[in-house]
Image (cartoon, rainbow, N blue to C red):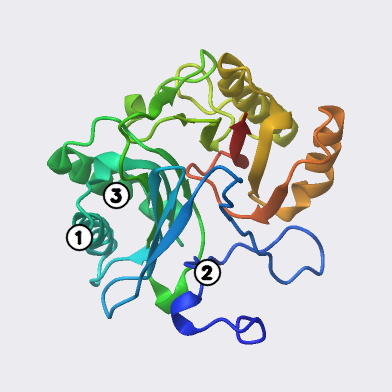
Amino acid sequence: AYNRAGLANDSLPVASFVGQPPCTPDQAFELQVYALIPNSSESASVTKIPATDDMPAARIIEIGGYRHFYARGITGDGYTFRSQSDTMFAKAAAMMSDHRCKFQDVLRSWYYLPDIDRDYDEFNRSRNQFFRDEQVTRLPAATGICGSLPARKQCGMDLHALLNPAGATIEVMRTPTLNEAPEYGSAFSRGMKLGLPGKTVLFISGTASVDEQGETAHVGDARRQIERMLLNIQQLLAPHDATFANLVQVISYLKTSDYLPMFREILNEWGLVNLPNSIVEANVCRPDLLVEMEAIAILP
C-alpha cells in the first residue's frame, strides 16, 4: 500500500504493529492514522529521524511553534522480560536525549505486553525504577495492554512528547471516581491536559472498571464494568468542560469479542454510536478487568 502511494522509505509514517484482533467478525486488521494539519495561520515542518539497527524511526513535528516528538515501536533486548523492559526504557531515554529532551517531556505513552497477565507486575517495577532514576514526577498518561509484537518481543512502547513546553499548559487529569494509579504501584496519570494556543487536547489513559480505592469494580459482570468504565471517562472529561462529543480518537479493548454485541448496545444507550472507535480483543492489565478504553479529545 505504501509503494502504491509512492512513499519512499524515508517518508513512511512511524508505526506500531500490534497483534490485537479486531472484534468485528471477518475483519482481518484495522488501521488508525494520526495526522497534524496546520491551519491557514500556522506553519508546520516535519523532521524525519531515520531508523537504525537499534532504534526505530521517529518524527518531530513542529506546528504552531510547538515541537511534538513521536516515536513508535520501541522495544528492548535480552532474554528475560525484565531485561527487555529495562532496555526498552533506556532506548527511549537515549532517543530523547539525542534531541535535547528527557522523559519528563512525555505526555502520552503506550505499552504492549504479549503476556500481560504474567508480566505486568514486573513491568511496573521496571517502569517505577526508570522513573525514579530519570526523576519523572509528572507521570505521563498511559495505556498498558496486551498485544503481540514483531520478532517475538516481550514488550514494546510508543510515546508522544512536547519538546518545548514553555507557554503550553500541562495538567494532570483527575476524577473523584478513580484513585491515583501510583497508589497501587502503577506509575501513570489518569489523563493529561495539554493547552495550546487555539485548542486544548485531553489524553485519556487506558481506563477500566476501577473504583475510588483502586479496586476492580463489578468483578465478573461485563455490563456493569462497561458502564463503570464509561462513567470514569465521563468524569475525567467533565472538569474540563468536555464530553464524549469532543472525542476524536478512541480504542476499546474487550477481553473477548463475545462482549461486542453487549458493548455496542451499551454505547447506543449512552448515545455513543458514532464514536471514532476501534474495538479490539485484548487482555487488560488485571485478569478480572474485562474492558478498557482510551481516548483523545480536542476542544477549540
Residue 106 image offset from top left, x and y in percent: 34, 43
Q: Which residue is found at the position 47% from the left and 20% from the top?
A: 174
Where residue 33 sits in the image (x, y, percent)? 61, 59
Residue for point 57% across, 39% down? 289
Secondary element at image label 2: loop
Q: Quadrant of the N terminus?
A: bottom right
> Which secondary structure lies at badge 3?
helix
Q: Quadrant of the C terminus?
A: top right
Q: Mark 1 or mark 2: which comes first in sequence? A: 2
Q: Is residue 72 left or right of residue 247?
A: left
Front residue of this view, candidates 52 and 62: 62
Residue drawn at x 76%, y 41% as measured from the top left = 275
Mark 3 and mark 1: Cα distance apart in space: 28 Å
The picture places residue 42, in percent across and down from the top left corner, at 52, 45
Mark 3 is surrounded, within 10 Å at the Cα level, by few (under 14), some (14 to 19) or many (20 or more) other residues, namely some
Q: Characterize the local packing of mark 2: few (<14), some (14-19) or many (20 or more) Cα atoms within 10 angstroms.
A: few
Q: Position of 273 compared to 103: left or right? A: right
Q: Is residue 109 above or below residue 29?
A: above
Relative side of 94 to 264, left or right: left
Q: Amino acid at mark 1?
A: Asp
Residue on which disc 1 sits: 98
SS for callout 1: loop
- Which circle's residue, 2 or 3, is located before the other in the chain? 2
Residue type at tag 3: Glu
> Which label number is shown at residue 17?
2
Q: Residues within 10 Å of mark 1 (few under 14, many from 20)?
A: few
Query: As shown in the figure, which amino acid type bears the numbered disc 2?
Result: Phe
Say if mark 1 contacts mark 2, CB within 8 Å. Answer: no
